[in-house]
Amino acid sequence: MNQRMNCNQELDVIIIGGGPAGSTAATTLARAGRRVRVLEKCKFPRFHIGESLLPYNRTIFQELGVWDKVSTAGFMVKRGAQFWMGDGSRHNRLDFSKGGFTEFPESIQVERSKFDHILLDHSREAGVEVREQCAVLRHETDADGVTVAYRDAEGVEQTARAAFLIDASGLGNLTANSASLRDYHSGHRKIAIFSHFSEVDMPDGDEKGDIVIVRRENSWFWLIPLDETKTSVGLVMDNADFKALGRKPEEVFEDAVRSTPAVRMRFDKAEALGAPQVAVDFSYRNKSLVSPRVVRVGDAAGFIDPVFSSGVMLAMTSGRDGARAVDEALSAGMAMNSAMRRYEKRMWKNVGLYWRFIEKFYQLHFAQLFFQPVNKYRMVCAINSVLAGRTDLSFAICWRLNVFFLLARLNRHVPVVKRIPIG
Ligand SMILES: Cc1cc2nc3c(=O)[nH]c(=O)nc-3n(C[C@H](O)[C@H](O)[C@H](O)COP(=O)(O)OP(=O)(O)OC[C@H]3O[C@@H](n4cnc5c(N)ncnc54)[C@H](O)[C@@H]3O)c2cc1C
């Protein structure tokens, strides 16, 4: 157990937000013997989008000691990811059990209300003080610690004091927004329109539980089976394109379903289980993830397009790594240390890994290769491992990825694969 910082704070760490990043950070610190309080503005269970997980999430579940609870909660098992062209003419399936470099053969699809609740209750059991319906308003750092002002469940403004603050406020991005740290990735200001549906005709048999991603010309759909009858379906497109249409989100969504054969063929009997919801303005990254006494984790560090379902895995990884850095700083009695800077570097490296795929997914020459994969030199296995959530890439994986990206670049000028229409 780590030595506690010798100071007069009532708490070692305050965490803003009880989503996957916040609860992972909280459990990690509580298990290291720290006094932790989570301030969460909602009452759990609460709805959240982001329902398809990656096999490598398993590593963190095991480290947190929550794997038994997650694996017996009845979530849909996910064995693969299918990428379809919008016209339905072609698709490519990543089977995690055949990844070669991928250690875990499967993952899960989750209703976030239930999943996030399991993680937050697990933090409580680890000794974290969780206060729900407490919205953080602002914070102030000084030489000895940080003071946080929040509105409690009765609407009364309160303050709390700790040695460190971890911001896990998700897209709310509280501390970074107040310091104007947000940088949008140019060309990636997106909107997502989504809902849950019954009776969507999803893959069955060995492919049951697969996520289906459908690529359209400049947008894409996700279809995520949550249980035997319920499927999450969402459309992601450029916000500028959406605004130019001048139509309501539900109209744009319905039109897109009708004009996309690969989705339409699954929608014969589908019925919406609720009104469509909308999320706007991603992807971004904050200019800095650490400053004296403050660390940002999860979406509050940065957010990337969800096409490869990397959000929860990256959020939990950064929650764990950010918490470990804070634990080291507490032991050293420092407001900022090299562990925090190393955390920042690692987080950007992990995000960069996905960003490389995401940016290219929207480009024709890459998509043509992606939809006609050749497993020469086990290049597809290398891609499989990254898209399964692996971030510690061996040389064997890295050089294969580099060859794949080189071929995709070449394909822009010289046909490396057959020219096929994408959309
Ligand atoms: C359209 C869309 C589709 C996605 N699909 C996927 C997917 O399929 N798979 C995947 O892995 N990821 C997906 N993601 C990403 C995923 O949702 C996020 O990466 C993940 O939820 C990040 O976790 P987090 O803990 O950082 O933030 P969150 O899960 O957002 O949690 C933040 C918490 O902080 C609380 N909070 C916010 N402000 C305050 C405040 N001021 N005071 C107190 N509490 C506060 C919120 O109530 C919330 O509970 C998707 C995202 C979007 C937008």
Image: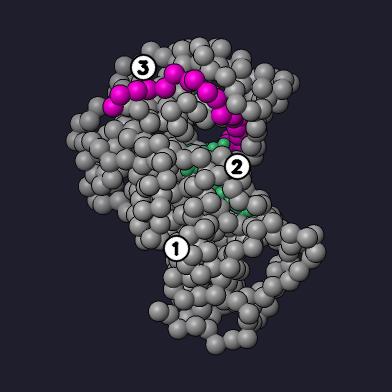
Query: What distance separates the C-alpha of mark 2 from that of mark 1?
Result: 26 Å
Query: What distance separates the C-alpha of mark 2 from that of mark 3?
Result: 34 Å
Query: Crowding at label 1, few (<14), some or many (≥20) Cα neighbours within 10 Å?
Result: many
Q: Of callouts 3 and 1, which one flags the residue occurring earlier in the amino acid sequence?
A: 3
**Residue at the location (50% across, 12% down)?**
268
- Residue 82, given in percent of the width and then of the height, sits at 37, 27
The residue that disc 1 covers is: 321
Q: Work out whether residue 389 can be spotted.
A: no
The residue that disc 2 covers is: 47
**Residue at the location (61% across, 51% down)?**
44
Q: Of callouts 2 and 1, which one flags the residue occurring earlier in the amino acid sequence?
A: 2
Looking at the rendering, the stretch of residues picked out in magenta corresponds to: 186-206
Query: Crowding at label 2, few (<14), some or many (≥20) Cα neighbours within 10 Å?
Result: few
Position of the N terminus, as image quadrant, is bottom left
- Residue 68, given in percent of the width and then of the height, sits at 36, 53
The residue that disc 3 covers is: 90
- Residue 97, given in percent of the width and then of the height, sits at 25, 37
Q: Is residue 373 above or below residue 131?
A: above
Residue extending farthest to the right is 156
Label 3: which secondary element: loop
Residue extending farthest to the left is 377
Q: Which mark is residue 294?
A: none
